[in-house]
Image: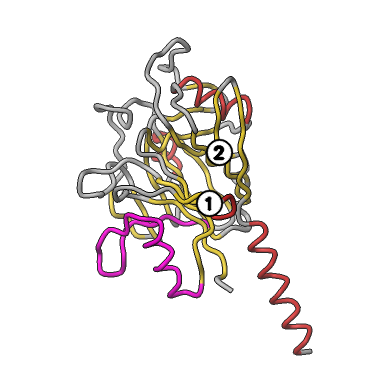
Amino acid sequence: MIRAVLAALAAAFWAESAAAVECRALDSGGNSFTICEVDATRADLRLFLRAPDGSILGQFPAVDRQLADEGRKLEFAMNAGMYHEDRAPVGHYIENGEEEMRVIASAGPGNFGLLPNGVFCIRDGRADVIETGDYLEQAPDCRFATQSGPMLVIDGALHPRFLEDSTSRYIRNGVGTSADGSRVVFAISENPVTFHQFGTLFRDVLKTPQALYFDGNVSRLYAPGIDRADGGFPLGPIVGIAVPAE
């Protein structure tokens, strides 16, 4: 009996670790990207912003150290939404069911205010990119949520303000989700790209009907499985996957 229980626990451990995230290089339209796919029905996908004392975590190693207190480690992470100089989120933010920042529904300056923007919502067994107006209407019970903008893909269509001949190019990162919320695809460009090119990646190559821009120029990725650990100045919200440490 004890042997069977131990075998079941070991199987669960390896299943969680193996299913957490798969990252790979992808070339599309003359541009290079790193893609990380997540099964939201199995992964421990979370948002991280503050330590228990209220200070900003800001760095991937700080998140990893915090997870160590749970006997877990960081398997994947990416910056996840725009933030102010003090690293507080610009838009809506929920962590462990606690709202830190309300939804911002109005248009405004910068990429965040380029409506429609959206919310990345993590619930038990699923994660979804939801356009902000729909998010307010649906009022989903998100355990974690981060608002950013602009939307890259809305119901299978590119954001209406994206121009194919745009000259605005940056390193960009974002997230797309499947209709059933089970498949989550994170992407970061390895060379500067336009919004149109980045949105087209999610729509036509990654096949996600909803996709959200996280940021540009400050975009960073932590993926030890492919020996990637970007560093730099402190970040605001971070999305990550926790797995057993042993």
| Residue 49 found in image quarter | bottom left
| Residue found 20% across the figure and 44% down from its top | 85
- Which amino acid type corresponds to the residue marked 2 in the rendered image? Thr
Task: Using a 10 Å C-alpha cutoff, classify the residue at mark 2 as few (fewer than 14 neighbours), some (14 to 19) or many (20 or more).
Answer: some
Looking at the image, residue 152 lies above or below residue 168: below
Residue 107 among those drawn in magenta: no
Q: Give how far apart the Cα atoms at labels 2 and 1 are.
A: 10 Å
Looking at the image, residue 107 lies above or below residue 145: above
Q: Pointer 1: what residue?
A: 223
| Residue found 58% across the figure and 50% down from its top | 226
Q: Secondary structure at mark 2?
A: strand
Magenta residues, start to end: 45-71
Give me the disc on residue 183.
none
Task: Using a 10 Å C-alpha cutoff, classify the residue at mark 1 as few (fewer than 14 neighbours), some (14 to 19) or many (20 or more).
Answer: some
Residue at the extreme bottom of the image, as rendered = 2
Q: Pointer 2: what residue?
A: 34
